[in-house]
Image (cartoon, rainbow, N blue to C red):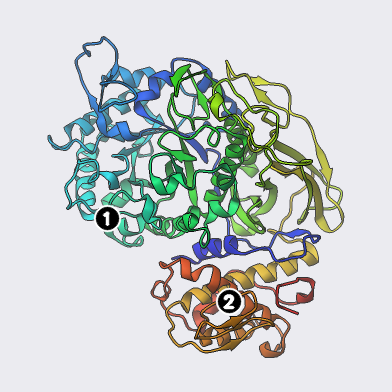
Amino acid sequence: MSIRSIASLAALAAVAAQDPSSPIDIPSHLPTRRLVPDVYGYSIEPIWVDDYISTPLAQTLLGAVARVAGKPPPIRVGGNTADQTYLHDAPLSTGNSSVAIPGYLNARQFNVTPAWYDGWAGYFPEGTDFVYTLNLAANTSAWSNAVAQAEAAHKSLGRRLKQFELGNEIDHFINKGWRDASWDVAAYVEQFRNVTGQIVSSEWYKGIADDGDKPTFQAGVFADPPWVPDQQDEIDDFSIANLTKDGEGGIVEREQDKDIIGSYATHLYPQSTCDGPRWLRMRLDLLSDHQVLWKVSGQPPFLRQSVNISQFVPQVAAADKAGAPLVMGETNSVSCSGKSGISDTFGAALWGVDYVLLGASIGIRKTYFHLGAQSEYSAFTPKPYRIKNETVGAGIRANWYGHYFVAKIVATNSDKDKELSIAALPGANSSSLSGYAVYTGEEEEERSLKKLVFLDMGVWNGTEGLSNNSTLKATDGTSFSNGTRPVSTIKVSTSWTAGQSVSVTRLTGPGTNAKSGVAVSAVTFDVRTGAKVGEEKEEVVEVGENGTVEIKIKRAEGVLLEITDGAVSEEVGSSGAAGKTGALWSGLFVAVMTIGFMLRDLEAKRCVTLPSPAIVCEDDTYSGAQQAHLPAKAHTLAQSLLAIAKSCLGFGDMEPAKSEVAPVVTYMVVLGLDALLGQVPIFRSSKFGDTGEQSICVTVAFFHLDLSGANPARHQYPGVT
């Protein structure tokens, strides 16, 4: 696994331990990942494409995003019915360009003609990038149907067709009866090479003059999360890490295959209406919990397997090493079409923002939210339909506003700002608060802090905005929070200059449970036409002394802060004295966590005395709040961390055992082992090779630790005096 991936994991796993009254620091040189303007996309089930293009609603909404973000959302046409789609040259008996058999809600086969592709090719905003999923399941005639689909799709879409997928959720093929028990990564690679070989050797593909216009392939397309057994339909070896042999072989062993793979895709639905274990996790308060979005272990039992974004860190690392980014190719809040009262609420809007940004911060390039014209999780629905004894109208749901808010986050105002990158803030990482820093500049030395995003993920169930004509009335809120809605003040130490103006954009709603009344700085959208309604409410705050910015935020609300005048910071995340301290603790945490991972397999254990009152012993006896199996060697390495840093970076003499910092370092090792190592079996010492002083030096130097002038006494850690 790459150092950058470990850095992202460690930074996000950190628990903010500072005094609540102290500003949130933005540590120097946070590991960042690219933030693209079309990071938030949609996946449309093939059988529902005709419904979506039958009204201007989707076109208008997606156009609004494009005008703000600078690029339309990417569209993937794929899903379960992709592997049931068959192309027919002759007109269908119905006279239409498509027909679902026996019907749309229970389709077992979806027949289309070339005119079907023409029907939606011109509907979406100019500049939309498309991914199209070919039928890999039907292999009785050497995949002639898939090869024909590829040609027909490209004939209609042209250069807008950026990628093909071969099959949808191919790790479920055994369970669906489409492959036998021998189906595995090796068999998939063989069939991938067969089908892609036919396509790239075809006359139409070779006839594309510009190589940059030739569609590439999005490989993988796996459904089962790698670390969550209760979400896996069958026992198999499908993961991006296995597919690419950790980026060093497998499907990219041959250079010609590596050249045509443009990305890798996985799918994730954190909650579900269609299987028992995830049904127990189907709660709005869990969807809104930032720590659940990252990962959860421990009590209660039904949450022990609720591991979400963190499990994809190794998959991102493997994809990166294989030469292409990882995308979340299909996702939403609740699988099997969603759950009204969860999927269509303001809480889901906040979750969607957090989900996309958290994924981007670890290297998930794009996230595609699945749409069905009659699905409860869809952000907008084109036509009225009948479901669960109710008639649900066409319209816009609360979760749509999360996408429009993300468009504001990824928007750039000049050519200079075209390339954005993102990092999650360790100081804003709890169940009820998440935070992100957005930078401009392509190279690290040119990066400047441009925007900050804070999401209050706390639950506030209000009494307003409970209904929406396009959602089920039976799920309108009936349980409400007591008292007055809390308002907090966030203080953040930035590298911005005192007196500079900072614009504020807010994602607001009457409550977590709200289905209507949602807005982005007072902007709403007409539920019938999708047209933008109202003008954005202007709100500006001023940067205070030492770059401090203060902003009030309601329980269950999102805020975007953007520097609007003068030059933005030249040094990433530096925030004066507070920034130096933040740099110290962020860097130390990442370095120590890396050491902790290296020590995962050490067996020698004995009692180690830690900062009072915690004592850890090999026989599992302990006192104090922390319990961990701490190899004795970890204590030695932690104590010597400063000495190693000194030799790497060349600052003045400091005896680690006598310093104020060493106990904190030791304590962080304990927290890291307790919180992470027991839950993350993939992080083993074999992944890291040399664990000697030289590799540790590289880690420390990579994060540019600056211990000079730091004052550990400013931070309060439990058990550390």
- Residue 308 badge: none
| First along the sequence among labels 1 and 2 | 1
Dividing the image into 4 quarters, which one contains the C terminus? bottom right
Q: Amino acid at mark 2?
A: Val
Dividing the image into 4 quarters, which one contains the N terminus? bottom left
Other residues around mark 1 within 10 Å, as few (<14) / some (14–19) / many (≥20): some
Q: Amino acid at mark 1?
A: Asp
- In the picture, measured across the screen, residue 73 lies left or right of residue 85, that is right
- Residue 670 badge: 2
Is residue 307 visible in the rendered image? The answer is: no
3D distance between C-alphas at marks 1 and 2: 34 Å
- Residue 236 badge: 1
Return the x and y of residue 497 as percentages of the image width and height. Answer: 82, 53
Q: Residue at x 63, y 70 (%)?
A: 587
- List the single residue furthest toward the top: 95
Q: State the residue in front, 648 or 404.
A: 404
- List the single residue furthest toward the left: 141
Q: Residue at x 31, y 45 (%)?
A: 260
Up-down relation of residue 604 to residue 294 (above or below): below
Up-down relation of residue 335 to residue 99 (above or below): below
